[in-house]
Image (tube, rainbow, N blue to C red):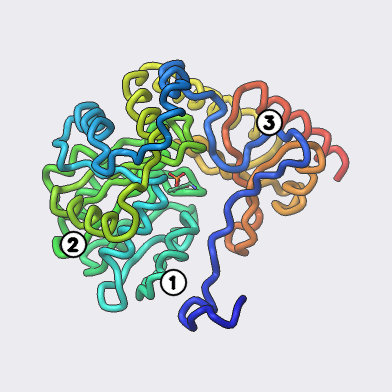
Amino acid sequence: MSKFLIDKYASLEAYTPGEQPRDMQYVKLNTNESPYPASPGVVAGISAEEVARLNLYPDPECKLLKEKLAAHYGVGYENIFVSNGSDEILSFAFMAFCSEQTGAVFPNISYGFYKVYGDLYGVDYTQAKLREDFTIDVNDYIGVNKTVVIANPNAPTGLSLSVEDIGRICASNPDNVVLIDEAYIDFGGKSCVGLVGKYDNLLVVRTYSKSRSMAGARLGFAIASKEIIGDLNRIKYSTNPYNINRLTLIAGAAAIDDNDYYADCCKKVAATREYAKSRLTDLGFTYLDSVANFIFARSDKIDGGEYYRKLKQNGVLVRHFSDPLISDFVRITVGTREQMDILFEKTEKILSEV
Ligand code: PMP
């Protein structure tokens, strides 16, 4: 830390992204990426001509991409916001809608970045405890008079809330934003996008990083009332108007045209997830009944941290969290069937040695 850093950031505990090692070729099941490549239309869209046009700034309005998203999700153009990954929307939303006065509430076990943004922006947040079975107790979010932030499905549990429950949360907090982070919704949960017309406080956040195979392009989007979208634009135009690069804008629009390709990828991931659950059962693991593209699993035979380390030695990366509430578990991203079979082969070997 330099002597120049201002005091309020000195104690900030930054988010730790999942490791991206370059030392060897791992079976990479640790950051919930799609195992499938970007679609043919996306690959074709990033032509040599478009690369050559990188001398020009991108469209700050992101018009074409927003038009495609609005048509695809059946909402108005003014209901769409796009960003450099969905993390950027989360950052803007914490900046715009949370403070020391307007607190926030999110689950104690959830996406780790909520807490980091809460700390970064000096938010008075509370972390509502999940139930013993790792489900969210909706009552913790009813009439709280704070900004509500919930990942649905939740991460790293993979468990989801119903659209009705999200509607109840919105209805009971009319003076606060309810941010529903649907990063993993395309793999099985039910989206609440249909509620945006009904609740002007609902902010639905989505990403291209998982179900649209574009984690490397950095593209997220939000769907909400035009007033909330206006607020996000106010922050964007006060920080970085060109927040999405030219190539990502092209890729994002092309991906909407290739929707069938991505729907098929999601179907394959969901089928592999169910296959993986049955293999985990056979190996004596217990797991939460995820509807996302990852499974949160544990075994009585091996500690979560040890299992993670042994898998890594065997060339398979999964994610382990040191938080004692969940340190028994590992989070396994659902890859291709072949990748999962390698995971299970290595797991059998590891278990036979402990
Ligand atoms: N929300 C959740 C719940 C996530 O797990 C992630 C991925 N780490 C994100 C948002 C951010 O994804 P991205 O910035 O790649 O869109």
Query: Label 3 amino acid?
Result: Asp
Q: Is residue 149 above or below residue 313?
A: below
Q: Residues within 10 Å of mark 1 (few under 14, many from 20)?
A: some
Q: Residue furthest front?
A: 55
Q: Nearer the viewer, mark 3 or mark 2?
A: 2
Q: Nearer the viewer, residue 134 or 248?
A: 248
Q: Which residue is mark 1?
A: 119
- Seen at 18% across and 62% down, the residue is 173
Please state if 200 lies on the left or on the right of 30 as rendered: left
Answer yes or no: do the residues labelled 2 and 1 have beta carbons within 8 Å? no
Between disc 3 and disc 1, whose residue precedes?
1
Distance between the Cα atoms at labels 3 and 2? Answer: 44 Å
Q: Nearer the viewer, mark 2 or mark 1?
A: 1
Estimate the x, y position of residue 297 in percent, counting from the top left: 61, 44
Q: Which residue is mark 3?
A: 282
Element type at marker 1?
helix
Answer yes or no: do the residues labelled 3 and 1 have beta carbons within 8 Å? no
Q: Nearer the viewer, residue 253 or 173?
A: 253
Q: Which residue is mark 2?
A: 173
Query: Label 2 amino acid?
Result: Asn
Element type at marker 3?
helix
